[in-house]
Amino acid sequence: MMFLVLQELFVEVGAGGGTSFTDTRIHPHISAQATVYPLKNFGAFYRFSLSNPNFLIKPPFSIDKAERLHVLGSSIRFANGNIQPWIEPGVAWYRERVRVSLFNDIIFEEIQGRTAVSLSGGVNIQMPWRKLRRLYFVPAGRIVGGRRPFWEADAGFAWRFGGPKNTR
Amino acid sequence: MRKITLIILNVYFFSVSALSQNRVGLDRIDAMIDRSAVGDIPRFLMEQTAGTGVMDVKIWAWWGGIDQFPPTAEKPPEENGFWVVPGIRMKGWHRYKFEELDRVISATKIYNLSVALAIHGPPKWPRGDVCEYDFGTYHPCGVIRQSHFEIFPNSLFDLAYYLALRYPEVKYFIAYNEPNLPYAFLPEKPYPGGSLLNAYIQLAYWPVSDGVRATGREVYVVGPEITLQDVENEFGETRWFEDWIIPIMEYYPNLFDVIGVHNYAVDANQTLEKMEKLQKTLVRFPHATQRIWLTEYNFGTQKESLTRTDIHVFSQLLNLYSNQWWERSYLFTMMDSLIFTDDANFGQKKPLYDFFKLLVQHYN
């Protein structure tokens, strides 16, 4: 019974910038995340982000690159009021598809990727408006990888399902 | 009339080809030092090089391989593969071993490749040190003892002179290699001239420059060949921009005919960022040498396997050459990057070879 009362689900969409395993330039990405707290301050999350970095390539060549990052892990929050700082250790699966074309014909295409550890940190800040009491602003950052990690920083909005009606 | 027309056309095409700048070059450091079971390896290597469509190669004239012995007072007997010549700034007789380099240069001629000859990798005797030159670029074996601050430049002058004399088709000579790294250049302190840059100019640049020009023919000197990174170690610290580029622009604006630099990076963005910094500096110093070559570069890091793949390197090559404002970039090196070097597949083309060929075809 206690489990059901405290169960909360945060669904977040966001955008930000960062680097990647193969691109040191800061480039934008969009993201979506779901975090569930079956216990009061301990839960699990899944996150997905997508990026299509631009290349200034002279014709007749062109490059199309898509980076995808899936992260699965646990979420530990340090408070559950209107400001909820958290950290999220996890396992990331990075995948990128690079397609090189010459005169619009694909001449080289490859998908490569690997798994890595990930650590995110951020804070859920509840919106001040009463009608939007389930909406949170979520600035966050993360590093992914070991010997040469990459980083991401983003901001998003999360909607809380379940939990107390008003935490203010 | 036909003859006159032919002459005019010849002059026109010659001047057009002389003025045209090939943007893509290949570093063939391996050509002089590699030995293998495939037979005439220099010829094989140059055949592979020419196969990419590249017209410009950087060849290493390995000082330690050519000039293994100090000059002798008595003229030594002539031997096969050696060239016995009198010292110019050095006393006595040199016994230069040009056999390997001769084969390399002959091979470049067969395939009509234009050579930039890099003179570096000194033997122990002109340095006065016991540490062998480190091919792995890790051990700090670039030591030059104070007691050898005269012998070193004098022997380098003689070598440069005889190189320029022996290979009249070579116009570009690269003065030393990565003097901001201790494996290559580590003169004892106090530095002659007070800084590492001045020490390089006195001990390496002038001997090469004076030596090749002493032949009286048209030659160009490329330097300082620093790698674009700040170096901090137990021997001191030197910053590529503040301690090398800026003083060169201020105090030695026209010392080099071409400013040659190296850069190894994870991706092209890092290289382009540094080159942009260099470009902005050239704008500040419009009367300084404006010709720039990236004489060594490659992409990827051992720390991240995804940056060592063909697709990564090829996409970065396209990025680099698409945004290259400088004259030429020499990929380091063809072996390993474009050709397999392991025993099982030695000499076979990697998939990247054919992609590189396409790049040369469209971007050179």
Image (cartoon, rainbow, N blue to C red):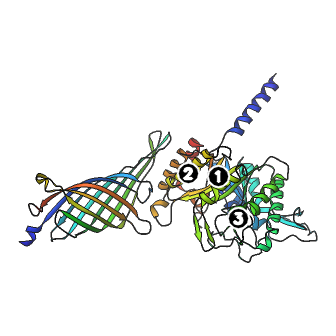
In the image, is residue B234 above or below residue B113?
below
Quadrant of the image containing the C terminus of chain B: top right
User: Circle 2 sits on which residue?
Assistant: B277
The disc labelled 3 sits on which kind of residue? Ile
Q: On the picture, is A80 further left or further right than B298? A: left
User: Circle 1 sits on which residue?
Assistant: B49
- Whether discs 3 and 2 lie on one chain: the answer is yes
User: Looking at the rendered structure, which numbered label has been put on residue A25?
Assistant: none
Secondary element at tag 3: helix
The disc labelled 2 sits on which kind of residue? Lys
Quadrant of the image containing the N terminus of chain B: top right
**Residue B153 in sight in this render:** yes
User: Circle 3 sits on which residue?
Assistant: B33
Q: On the picture, is A82 further left or further right than B315? A: left
Q: On the picture, is B59 further left or further right than A130? A: right
Chain letter, disc 3 residue: B
Between circles 3 and 2, the one closer to the viewer is 2
Q: Position of residue B56 (x, y in %)?
A: 67, 49
Q: Residue B14 appears in which quarter of the rendering?
A: top right
Q: Which residue does the image show at 55% across and 46% down from the upper left? A: B321
Q: Which residue does the image show at 9% across and 63% down from the upper left? A: A164
Secondary element at tag 2: helix
Q: On the picture, is B31 further left or further right than A12? A: right
Mark 1–mark 3 Cα distance, whole angstroms, equals 16 Å
Secondary element at tag 1: helix
